[in-house]
Amino acid sequence: MDNGNSQERRNLIRVGTRKSQLARIQTDSIVEMLINKFPDAHFEIVAMSTTGDKILDTALSKIGEKSLFTKELENALERNEVDLVVHSLKDLPTTLPLGFTIGAVCKRESPYDAVVLHPKNVGHTLESLPKNSTIGTSSLRRAAQLKKQYPHLEFKDIRGNLNTRLKKLDEQNDFSAIILAAAGLHRMGWEKRIDQILLPEQCLYAVGQGALAVEVRAKDQDILIMVSALQDPPTVLRCIAERAFMKRLEGGCSVPVAVSTVIKDSQLYLTGAVYSLDGSDCLKETMQRTVVFPDEEVDGPNDDSQHVGITALGVPRKALESAEYLGTELADLLLSKGAKEILTVARQLNDAR
């Protein structure tokens, strides 16, 4: 009997997650995929609160960078209290702490933003809402793009998890609509609440939006190889380009940086933009590079080269390098046209708010 227990303990893999309902749904979906691929392994979910979950009265862009939602989880990973952690990729900084890596980026859900209207406004779009209607969003990126297109609307910070934000919308009269990531609404089974999808022509999305990432200890080869079974190569390449773009711009949630990517006919197309806080200044460009190379060897398990924090076992190295180069190249083009000045002013104005 004891033998069985000790064997089970050896096969026990602890999965760290935030406590919110959406985080749990996302983590459950990853664990389910792992169980399907590794039926002999046993998984235990360890839920914890992060700093970002606890500070709900301040705009995200005012309380620091993205590690707000990841630090506590990474601490648990470092102390060997968990073996892997599930995140929304857009919450992860482009540079991870030493010793960690993203071992898998799973197939992307919709990366688009969605408009959810107050019940009294159903049937409207952003365009048709009455003048001075208040739109809730905690994202400088969304506000900057939408202020420019819809000058008749007011934009105001709204914080909290998905449940909290929807409750604030429905039960108070502070907001005419709120903007959320479509992916979260899909995962919660709340697609019916989506009144309008904002396509990239209207609103470019956040780096990594809609993709789930599995973070592991970089030297933990067994776990790294295991989670790499969840890798979705097209999503990985798109997200590497997006993260490389953000990293070169030194962007984060305190500046409006936005992207859109698509892979078509062996080419990865990346559109990237930077905005002033009010959306009046904007630099936006599109570039492309080849990411499909015939007959190329893929990296083996001992090749631990990272691309903007991602170790993508099973994806050809040349493709990964091409995607990363594309992001950096596009950022350099925008920097040559004055992106740094726009972002510096945006950061200063945001700090002064």
Image: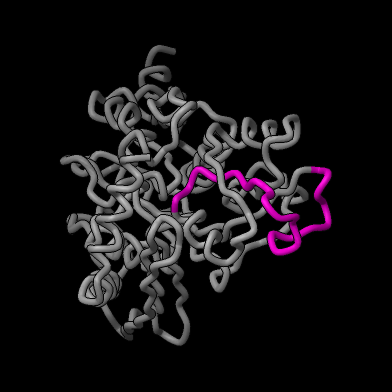
Colour setup of the view: one colour
Q: Is residue 39 left or right of residue 254?
A: right
Q: Is 126 colored magenta in this rendering?
A: yes
Chief SS of the magenta region: loop
Identify which residue is drawn at 59% across, 61% down: 151
Q: Nearer the viewer, residue 83 or 264?
A: 264
Identify which residue is drawn at 40% across, 26% down: 50
Give percent across and percent down for residue 28.
Answer: 55, 37
**Where is 110 relative to 20, above or below?**
below
Q: Is residue 72 left or right of residue 148?
A: left
Give percent across and percent down for residue 46.
Answer: 44, 24
Q: The N terminus appears in which quarter of the rendering?
A: top left
**Where is 22 relative to 117, above or below?**
above
Q: Nearer the viewer, residue 330 or 304?
A: 330
Q: Is residue 325 visible?
A: no
Q: Is residue 85 left or right of residue 341?
A: right
Identify which residue is drawn at 68% across, 36% down: 174
Q: Nearer the viewer, residue 167 or 317?
A: 167
Q: The C terminus appears in which quarter of the rendering?
A: top left
**Where is 286 relative to 308, above or below?**
below
Give percent across and percent down for residue 177.
Answer: 69, 47
Instruction: Place residue 98 in its image quadrant.
Output: top left
Q: Which residues are magenta?
A: 119-140
